[in-house]
Image (cartoon, rainbow, N blue to C red):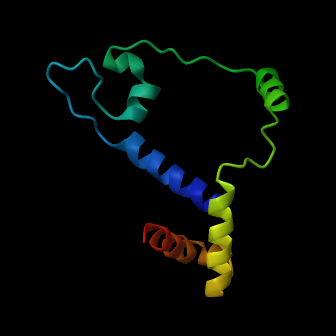
Amino acid sequence: MPLLQREAHDIQEDWNSHRIRFQKGKDRPCGVPNDLFDLPSMHGAQDMKHEVSHSDISFLKEKFDLGQDLDYLPQTFKEEADLFIKFTGRVLKLETATEIYEALVLHFSQ
């Protein structure tokens, strides 16, 4: 999961720091998403951010048990991926995660 989180973070960083060009006839903002978010008044927008209290965050964490291990992959995928890793003799560690990920992508795309 840390590898996927890092990849998602990298995509977020790339997207939020790129420049969106002006599009004639479109009612869309232009500029850098991070700048639009941090300094909306400089782009003719209103700051709509809202502070969230720690008690609200705690309440939601307890209500929805956000600490649990989230199961987001189908069981059949997990089973086939585990068999592939076992069959190829690979050891799943942080150092081998990229290599195994690429091998799994190739395996499942065939």
Could you tell me residue 59's position as x and y percent? Answer: 83, 24
109 displayed left or right of 2: left
97 displayed left or right of 68: left
* Most foreground residue, 15 or 80: 80
In the picture as drawn, the residue positioned furthest to the right comes out as 62
Q: Is residue 51 above or below residue 74?
A: above
> Within the image, what quadrant is residue 57 found in?
top right
* Most foreground residue, 45 or 82: 82
Q: For the N terminus, which image quadrant?
A: bottom right
Could you tell me residue 68's position as x and y percent? Answer: 81, 45
* Most foreground residue, 77 or 50: 77
Could you tell me residue 84's position as x and y percent? Answer: 61, 77
In the picture as drawn, the residue positioned furthest to the bottom comes out as 89
Q: Is residue 107 above or below residue 75?
A: below
31 displayed left or right of 107: left
In the picture as drawn, the residue positioned furthest to the front comes out as 76
Name the residue located 30 percent from the left edge and 23 percent from the top edge: 29
